[in-house]
Every structure is written in C-alpha cells, then in structure tokens.
Amino acid sequence: MDGMPECSWDAGPTSFASFGDIPGNLCSPTDDWPRPFRNLNHDAAWDHLAAASNLHSVKFDPTGRWRADALNFQPCAETSSQDRRIWTLSAVFDGHLGSHTVEHVAHHMPIIVREHLELISEKHGDRVVPPPLIADMFAMAIRAFDDAIANDVLELFPGGLSSLSRLSDLQIQEVLDDQLSGGQNYTKARLCLYGTTALVALVDPDHQNLWLANLGDCQGLIVSETDQKAWNVEVLTRFHNGENPLEVQRVMNEHPGEPECILDGRLGDTPFKQPPEFTRRILYNLYPGQHDTSPWEEFLMRNHTPPYISSTPEVTHYPLDPSPRAPRRYLILCSDGFTDICGTNQRAIVDQWVRAAACSSSRELD
C-alpha cells in the first residue's frame, strides 16, 4: 500500500468445498473427521508455521519507507487458500465455503472502488474531497458491488423474483445451465452459493488519510512507535459476527419478533439476504438433485424479513502524518485465522513482529 508499511496475515484454515457445498458441509466426503493431530512444542510449532507460510514483500519506493509485507498460513497443501490480498488498495478477503465468490471479489472490487473514486474526483475537480465523502463513497461502492451479485442473477428472469412462480423447475434449469454455451449464467448463479468477508484499506495519494472498510470478522490494526521507542497498538475495526453484542443487538432491532434471527457478517452468502424463493427456485435448481437441502431449509423456515446479513461496511477514517520525521507506523490487516491462533497473546506477537520489522527496516536504510 502506498500509505505506510503494512503486514497482512491470512491464517484461516481452508475448507474442502465442492460445487454442491451448503452450510454444515465443510469437508469433502473423503476426509476423515475429526482429523488427527499432535501437540507441538514452541520451536516445532514455529518451524511448521514458517514452512507453511508464503512470505513476500513489496517496496513502493527505493528507500523502502513505503512497503507492504504479507504472509499466508495455508496448512492444507492439497487446496488453495480462499483468502485473497489485493495491493492496489490493500485488502484481505476471507472466503466462505469455497473460492468462487472470493475470487470474483478480489478481481472486481478494486475496479468498482476505482470507478467510484474517479467519479467523485471528477465532481470535485481541483478541490480536495472531504474525508467523510470518501468514506461514504467507499461504503457505497462495496454495497453496490455486493448487491450486483444477486441482481445479476435476477436479471436472467424477466420480472425478477416474482416471475419465478410462473416457471417450472425445468425452465429455470434451462436458463441456469448454459455451460455448453459459455456458462455465463451458471457462473453468476454459482457466486450466490458462497461468500467472503472484506477488509479493504484505502490511502490517498498524499499519504494523509487512511480509510478502512470492514465487513465480517477480519481485523485492522495500526501499530505506532512512541517517543519512548515503544509501540502503541490500536484496533481500528470491530468483529461483525455473533460474538459482538452490538452486532447481535443491531440485527435483533432490525428483525423484531424473530428470536432466532441470524448474523454472520459476510460479503456474499446471498441466501441470507434474499427471500426464500431465491434459494428454493434458483439455487436449488443450479444443482438439481445433487445435494441435501435440509441445512438450507432449517434456515429458510425462519427467513421472514431478509436481509439477515448486512453488506454495508463499517468505514473508519484514520489521519496519517506523511512527513519524513513522523514516527514509524504499520498497518496490519489479518483474517480471523490469525486472531484465533494468537488468542490472548495477539498483542505480544504483534509487538514481537513489529520490533523485528523495524529493525529490518533500519538495516536496509543504513
């Protein structure tokens, strides 16, 4: 990222997902469950993590002052990670159940955000766009992108969701199953079976402002050097899941009289945002007869007033000091896998990493 040195951690275990995956089915039929494991001592654990990580750095200027470091803990060598990082903005996307939606988001979201930035910049001309307007634009771009995932499918049926009652399952299947002619309809519908969280950082060209848009349970931190050569850690995001009482209360307020309303906080996961007819008539007919629909039905019977998952991100603005004499500062973007692994030791591990990174930067500058 062009704003400050940063580190991105992706430590989430990847599920084995087939095209027919549905909630509750996180492993392939050939996997043994529960999987065997053995306890490792401290040194052995670090050796295994080092071997499994994919460490890489990108310098944005010759001095190395603006640098991005990333590593990916992917313990399942037989499958690719569902998390993606995009350095045009700086982002972590934590895929849910499969990689199709997260791949789509990782490729297209930077394009959508760039288009919205260009529009708002054109409207302001030579004037500086106020930070609150950038935050609103950021949230609007992500919300519009997420809405388009379902809308692209509904547009395949003239009249939208209400028209499905006039179509047979076979007619719907004929629309969706176009794989012999390119598979565009099939690809659009398949995106609605999966999901992803999103943590996206945006920094202005002058390195004066950071905006952090968050949907889900990833985490963004700023680590700043103090006058005492110590490090101050600030958590800039909140978890959007059932472990956050504020998020639970928000959903309960939006769905009064529904004690079993659900919150998971992901970008995608369309069945939690659309009426039951969307899942029963469209998604069921994407793979007719090939999967058990009972986990879906368990939720759909309680799906009275969607959406139950919000696609409006929480955007945090953080002012930056671009001067050469400003204290060193690092932005850390991590998936929930990193926070789960660290547990109560997260701050100590972050402190250990940032001291090593600062020492490495000093040696490089010398």
Image (cartoon, helix red, strand yellow):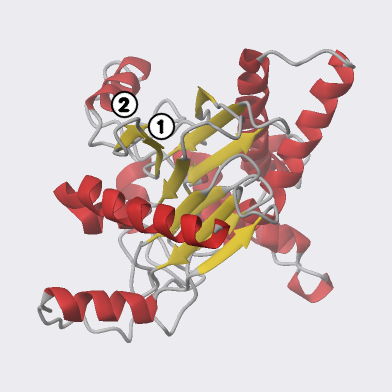
Rendered residue at 52%/36% (across/down) = 274
Query: What residue is pinned by disc 1?
Result: 308
Instruction: From the image, tell me which residue sits under label 2.
Output: 247
Expressed as whole percent of the image width and height from the top left, the position of residue 49 reads 31, 74
Callout 2: SS: helix
Query: Which image quadrant is residue 347 in?
Result: top left
Q: Against 43, is 62 above or below? A: above
Residue 207: x and y, percent? 65, 32
Closer to the camera in the image, 20 or 27:
27
Residue at horizontal 45 percent and vertical 29 percent from the top: 306
Circle nearer the N terminus (2, 1): 2
Residue type pointed to by label 1: Tyr
Please report the residue visible at 62 percent of the width from the left and 36 percent of the height from the top. Answer: 202
Give the Cα distance between marks 2 and 1. Answer: 11 Å
Please, what secondary structure does the residue beneath circle 1 have?
Answer: loop
Q: Is residue 242 visible?
A: yes
Percent position (x, y) of residue 122?
89, 22
Identify the residue at horizontal 35%, vertical 49% (top origin).
297
Give the label on residue 238, or none. none
Q: Tell me the quarter of the image containing the C terminus.
A: bottom right
Marks 2 and 1: CB-CB under 8 Å? no
Binning the other alpha carbons within 10 Å of mark 1 as few (below 14), some (14 to 19) or many (20 upward) gives: many
**Residue farthest toward the front in the current orientation of the protein:** 366
Count of numbered marks: 2
Q: Nearer the viewer, residue 53 or 216?
A: 53
**Residue density around tag 2, few if under 14, some if 14–19, many if 20 or more, within 10 Å:** some
